[in-house]
Amino acid sequence: HETVYAIASGKGGVGKTTTTVNLGTALADAGARVAIVDADLGMANLAGFVSLSPDSTTLHDVLADDASIEDATYRLADDIVAVPSGTSLDEYAETSPEGLREAVDDLRSRFDYVLLDVGAGISHETVLPLGLADAVVLVSTPEPAAVHDTKKTVELTDRSGGEVAGLVLTRTRPDGDVSHADLADRLEVPLLGTIPEDPAARDSVYAGTPLVVYEPDGPAAVAYRRLAADLTGLE
Ligand code: ADP
Ligand code: MG
């Protein structure tokens, strides 16, 4: 099965980190060994979602050749670890994203699933993980601007030799006037799932706890568990 997924988007702020953390936690709860990696090197914030302190060894140190990937790997629960990135510009300046391949290969050999939380946009450090991953999970809200930007991520994935798994629509509303299937059709990719707008998503970030743990019966948590099951067959 696919092991390494890049969680990617064209536009920022659409739910990539939320998806990485909750898809990862749902897979771990289903019995898989999971690593979630903050590959958003410039705007790293995955650590806060899971209450990790960012002043310890991070992926930046690994990519600057100052630490091994093991040193930057932190256990969150029995079956899930996180690799945070640094939050300072000084550390970021030292990194060279090329080393990411080695780090991902190491994680690939030790985990059932590796989820890469990729930065938005079209910069080099964003494109690299798209080609490294076995499959790319596109994340977008239903807004036209976000869907439009997702098209670029599809093109970039093609150009970097990567494979698109499909689209996850986030922050959907029951009264939305666009058909979710149409949006996926427009991008010519499968619709993997929809995650409804849910205030618990933001609350869970303040609590530093994954949504699927913070409010497991809420609509977004239920949708993330379904996505995990549909994507991998694990429940
Ligand atoms: P990205 O990583 O793409 O920048 P985030 O995962 O950080 O996006 O999410 C951006 C904002 O949207 C955060 O404040 C997050 O709490 C909120 N959010 C994400 N998913 C949902 C949802 N399903 N319902 C409501 N708010 C959400
Ligand atoms: Mg993010």
Image: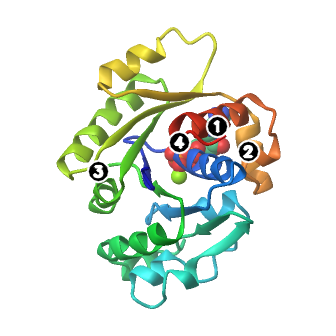
Calculate the distance from the C-alpha at mark 4 to the C-alpha at mark 3: 28 Å
Q: Secondary structure at mark 1?
A: helix
Q: Which mark is residue 232?
A: 4
Please determine whether, in this image, residue 150 is positioned above or below residue 120. above
- Camera sees residue 44: no
First in residue order: circle 4 vs circle 3: 3
At 40% from the left edge and 23% from the top edge, which residue is drawn? 144
CB contact under 8 Å: marks 4 and 3: no
Q: Secondary structure at mark 3?
A: loop
- Using a 10 Å C-alpha cutoff, classify the residue at mark 1 as few (fewer than 14 neighbours), some (14 to 19) or many (20 or more): many
First in residue order: circle 2 vs circle 1: 2
- Residue 175 position, x and y percent, is 61, 10
At 51% from the left edge and 8% from the top edge, which residue is drawn? 177
Residue carrying label 1? 224
- The figure's colour scheme reads rainbow
First in residue order: circle 4 vs circle 1: 1
- Residue 162 position, x and y percent, is 27, 49
